[in-house]
Amino acid sequence: MSLTSTDAYVLSRIDGVTLAHEIVDACGLDAGTVTEILNRLTAMGLIRWDSEAQNDSGTPSGEPGRRVSGTRVTTKRNIVSIQPPPPGLLERFEGLTHYQLLGLHSDCSQEDVERGHVRARDLEEGTLAFRLAKRLGTRRVLGRVAAAYEALRSPQTRKKYDAYLLYREETRAIEDALSEGVRRASLVPPPARTSAPAVRASQRGILGEGLEAPRHAPEDTIAEYYLVAALREHVPSAARRARAERLVRSAIAERDSDNLVGATNALRLASSIAPECDALESAVAAITEEMNKSLAPTFRAQAMYEENLQMWEEAAKTWEKVLVGHPDDARAARGVAEALLAAGGDLKRARRRAEDAVKHAAEDPECHRTLARVYIAAGMTKSAQRALDMAESRETKQDERRGLLRRVRSRWSRS
């Protein structure tokens, strides 16, 4: 059995889930060439097609030069053992909702949940769980199936999960918008080298007074008069300057309407168009910081839901997003450490975050206890004992303060 490099490349795109026409698109090769390779791989016994996709001869439908579509390809067991799961498939798997994994709609009945769980748990052929288990491993998929059933098995837990999905949908929309902004900014070509002078001061009109302002944008606001004037001073290209000015004004309008994501993207794109303007770069940093602070409560609520649902890997990632906006938030740092411990994640990172939590909330015994648990998991028993002693001493002080407060209140009530 011999495979060309092109054959091996096409084979590597087959994950047991992706549609055949999607494989053609992903390969970036001529559709007829990919079709021939798929037929050849089928004849060699390296791949098989779903039964409904086969013709009388058992080979995939499609002629050279035509795009194959409407079928799914699955690798055989011997190839599965050789090919590692592609990162894209693993990412899609982790992004599936519990409903999607069990093959359900979000408005399904509890009876549907029971039936969907049984089909997925038994890896019934044709289910998404069955196809994923072939490529990602039975243990990983069945673990997710069990977690999905635990979250959906009762109306109470299902209500919590549905509320979490609303937060996840909101935060993903935000992150998608920010990613698109970064992508667009990255596509802007750098300015051509030029020695042309910027607009003279006499041509700037009333905006010229803005040039007397400090050379850094204010931290708490975007000063339109200053940024536009700075652009006119430092950006020689008239076309770039005009486009950047429009984006600055758009950013200010977005910020005034509390759309900090839109304002950030507009300023980021303006900064890519006019990288010569340091004031614009400072404004991007200021609005990004403001945006991260405003998003922190939304990420915090999502992280709390993920903790309640015991979605530890997701909770660790979401608590990290809280820390982007509030780097001194002890609860968020402790949340990262505890989630990583529960998920069996990176102990070094868990220790770093637990130590941050203690640093920012030295009087909180829970932070010291979390640090102790991280030390125990890392085999640092002496350090763990010291952290537990600190937690006990802090708790004693808290009890003393509570007792004093109760006595004071009691005296006031008697008087």
Image (cartoon, rainbow, N blue to C red):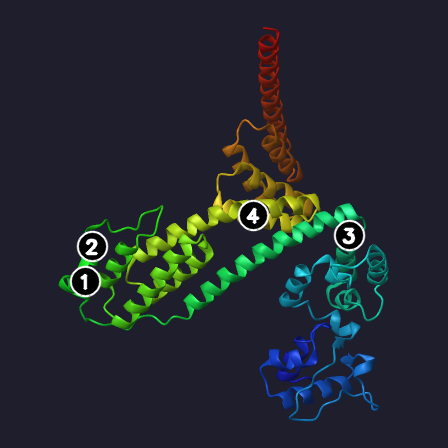
Q: Callout 2 environment at 10 Å: few (<14), some (14 to 19), or many (20+)?
A: some
Who's the residue at 22% across and 54% down the image? 210
Total labels drawn = 4
Marked residue nearer the N-terminal end (3 or 4): 3
Task: Label 2, secondary structure: give it.
Answer: helix
Q: Nearer the viewer, mark 1 or mark 3?
A: 1
Q: CA distance from mark 1 to mark 4?
A: 43 Å
**For this view, does 319 lie left or right of residue 258?**
right
Say which amino acid is labelled 1: Arg
- Residue 369: quadrant of the picture: top right
Marked residue nearer the N-terminal end (1 or 3): 3
Task: Label 4, secondary structure: give it.
Answer: helix
Q: CA distance from mark 4 to mark 2?
A: 38 Å
Q: Which residue is mark 2?
A: 211
Marked residue nearer the N-terminal end (2 or 3): 3
- Residue 229: quadrant of the picture: bottom left
The one nearer the camera, 184 or 316, is: 184
Disc 2 to disc 1: CB gap under 8 Å: yes
Q: Which residue is mark 3?
A: 152
**For this view, does 219 lie left or right of residue 96?**
left
Q: CA distance from mark 2 to mark 3?
A: 60 Å
Residue 235 lies, in percent from the top left, at 25, 65
Is residue 6 shown above or below 216?
below
Q: Callout 1 environment at 10 Å: few (<14), some (14 to 19), or many (20+)?
A: some
Q: Is residue 229 visible?
A: yes
Residue 324 lies, in percent from the top left, at 49, 47
Q: Which mark is residue 298?
A: 4
Residue 140 lies, in percent from the top left, at 75, 58
